[in-house]
Amino acid sequence: MRFTPKFKIGIFIGFFVLTLSANLVLFYTFSSKNMMPSYLDVDRKPNGNTFICTFSFREVINYPNRVRNQIPVPDNSTEHSIFEVDQYGNKVWEYIGLAQPHEVEYLPNGHILVADTGHDRVIEIDYPNKNIVWEWKPELINWTEINSAWDTTHYYNNPIIFDWTHLNDVDFKNYSTWSACLISLRNFDMIVEINYTAERLGPANSPNNIIWYYGDYNNHSLLYHQHNPDYLSDGNIIVSDSENDRILKVNYSNKEVFWSYQSGMRWPRDADELPNGNILITDSLNSRVFEIDAVSKQIVWSFRGDLINPYEADMLDNGNILIGNGIGGVVYEINPDGFEVWRYGISYLKSLIYLNCILAIIIESATIFFIFNGMKGRSLNRIEKILKYFFISFLGFLIAVAFIFLFFYTSIAVMVFIAMTGAAR
């Protein structure tokens, strides 16, 4: 049976539309069923298991709407959690009831500290029993007692329903006779240190227990929406000054910046001091993790791989790097040579992009072939030639777009992330 060229073109266009629709359905299914997670902080336990902070890609997309309309995350949401996996990828423990958890830290006493970002609090969980044994909530602090300039009209003393502080990190330190927590209040443009020992003895949430702070609201010369402050081995502080695209070392005693790095980064969200004195940096919007010599500030090691908007990276005791790969939906452990030695998760976003692009290239290439095949031996008038070559050019353009998505899907995914989430940064 001989099919007319129009019929062939119609078949391929119909198949293309059907394929595209099917993949949109798959995308919706993956996102609505929480099968497209965003992985933030990851923490390796002494027994080799891994804690992972996560919330769904759907919640990532919904974040601007929550902020704009002040819609809190439901307390019973299963789309926000911290869970533990063993070395084989089996989920062995999970804690829900959180809101965009950004940080988990395993404590010496076996408990875990969590930065429960969307609930504007730090909580300590009696692991594995899931009992909250302590919480620190900025809304209970009278900030005027810490700085008289922060009066009752100040942002610090006026909590809002959702994403008031965007409390995105907590770091624990033992000072021998007492312990402290270093906490990042992103929307305050400030990090604070609290006396954890005094907090646990009570009363909790006392202004007197805030013993140090750095930054001030909207003073972006100091900090601007920072992430992941850490204690350095010399007692000073390192922090990713994210919106200023720089890494800072702050003198703990006089609060002066004595070291900084700002070279080609886009929204860095983690910087760790390594045993050799170098700095490991997670450069989120450039989708890379790299190490610099702290003295020369030269890059000595870099990794991109399949990273899409990575959140943080830690060097493990074995010298490997553990990476929470943000919207990439995968946790990686890589060795110093950049080879993957362990992973958790599947990049559904990458899989969908690749599937759509490859199918589009096949369908559109076949369509062009049949158009040319149908033109052989036929005498076409000028209008017919113009229409056919216009259609062929259009299909060629779509093929080129598909190839661009295939080879630059990481950059495109980051651009989509920025466009869709906005303030989620």
Image (spheres, rainbow, N blue to C red):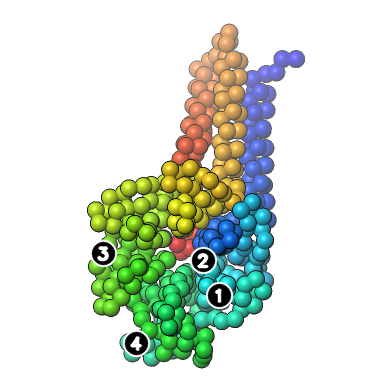
Could you tell me which secondary element the residue under label 3 belongs to? strand
User: Which residue, given by chain and number where applicable, does mark 2 sit on?
Assistant: 102
**Label 3 – label 4 distance at C-alpha:** 26 Å
Camera-nearest label, 3 or 4: 3
Q: In this rendering, does residue 406 appear at all?
A: yes
Mark 2 crowdedness (10 Å alpha carbons): few <14, some 14-19, many ≥20:
many
Q: Provide residue 280's location: percent of width, then percent of height.
A: 38, 56
**Label 3 – label 2 distance at C-alpha:** 26 Å
User: What's under tag 4, amino acid-wise?
Assistant: Asn
Camera-nearest label, 1 or 3: 1
Mark 3 crowdedness (10 Å alpha carbons): few <14, some 14-19, many ≥20:
few
Q: Provide residue 59's location: percent of width, then percent of height.
A: 58, 61
User: Which residue, given by chain and number where applicable, does mark 3 sit on?
Assistant: 259
Q: Residue furthest right?
A: 1
Pick the quarter of the image with the C terminus. bottom left
User: What's under tag 1, amino acid-wise?
Assistant: Asn
Q: Provide residue 400's location: percent of width, then percent of height.
A: 48, 32
Could you tell me which secondary element the residue under label 4 belongs to? loop
**Label 1 – label 3 distance at C-alpha:** 34 Å
User: Which residue, given by chain and number where applicable, does mark 1 sit on?
Assistant: 109
Residue at (55%, 66%) from the top-left corner? Answer: 100
**Of label 3 and label 2, which has the lower sequence position?**
2
